[in-house]
Image (spheres, grey):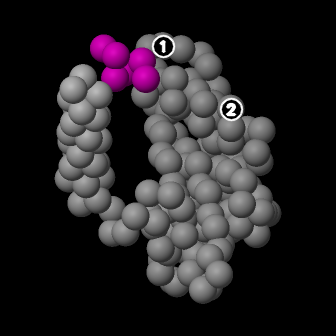
């Protein structure tokens, strides 16, 4: 008898979890694959340009882009078997004068400098930055976002 009650409770919990996932996750994306591999990039769009640049230089790993004004994008792209390019983009922002911190000003200025280089790879209004600089700036932007969210 206890076993049947335990199974009912587990079934009810699993059903509630599936219901929650169905109502919370699926409406926010066009397809379940979007959650796993990113959105489909339409040729000619900025998303497609970012994905194409990312896949050509990073071969599926994360590539980093900046607009030179504190915005840093982490872009992951994947070419599917049917020729569709799926791209996921995570954005962070680094304000120039965050809490009067010299580091934020240095990172902001460095991103601006990289965005003006002539030989830089451009994708729409963004410029690809090297992996080390991009990762450092992206992580710093995540720290800022986390700190602002906790306030």
Viewport quadrant of the C terminus:
top left
Between 54 and 38, the residue placed more toward the observer is 38
| SS under mark 2 | helix
Instruction: Say which of 19 and 133 sits in front.
Output: 19
The magenta segment: 146-151
Q: Is mark 2 in CB contact (under 8 Å) with mark 1? A: no
The residue under the point 64% across, 41% down is: 111
Residue 13 x/y as whole percent: 25, 36
How busy is the neighbourhood of tag 1: few (under 14 within 10 Å), some, or many (20 plus)? few
Kindly identify which numbered label has been placed on residue 100: 1
Q: In this view of the protein, which residue sits in the foreground, 114 or 32?
A: 32
In the rendered image, residue 5, in percent from the top left (x then y), is placed at 21, 29
Task: Judge whether residue 76 is colored magenta.
Answer: no
Mark closest to the chain's N terminus, 2 or 1: 1
Q: Specify few, some or many for label 2: CA neighbours under 10 Å numbering under 14, 14-19, or 20 or more.
A: few
Query: Which residue occupies 33% across, 62% down?
Result: 29
Is residue 2 among the parts visible in the rendering?
yes
The mark lying in front, picked from 2 and 1, is 2
Which numbered circle lies on residue 136?
Answer: 2
From this view, report whether residue 61 is shown above or below residue 98.
Answer: below
Q: Secondary structure at mark 1?
A: helix
- Label 2, label 1: how many angstroms apart (C-alpha)? 19 Å
**Where 107 falls versus 148 (above or below)?**
below
């Amino acid at each position: 008898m206890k076993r049947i009650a335990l199974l009912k409770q587990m079934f009810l919990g699993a059903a509630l979890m599936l219901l929650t996932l169905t109502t919370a996750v699926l409406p926010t994306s066009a397809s379940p694959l979007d959650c796993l591999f990113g959105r489909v990039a339409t040729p000619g769009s900025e998303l497609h340009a970012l994905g194409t640049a990312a896949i050509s230089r990073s071969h599926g790993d994360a590539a980093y882009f900046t607009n030179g004004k504190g915005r840093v994008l982490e872009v992951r792209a994947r070419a599917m078997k049917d020729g569709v390019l799926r791209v996921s983009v995570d954005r962070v922002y680094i304000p120039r004068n965050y809490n009067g911190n010299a580091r934020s000003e240095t990172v902001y200025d460095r991103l601006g400098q990289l965005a003006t280089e002539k030989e830089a790879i451009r994708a729409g209004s963004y410029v690809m930055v090297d992996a080390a600089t991009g990762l450092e700036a992206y992580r710093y932007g995540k720290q800022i976002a986390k700190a602002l969210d906790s306030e």
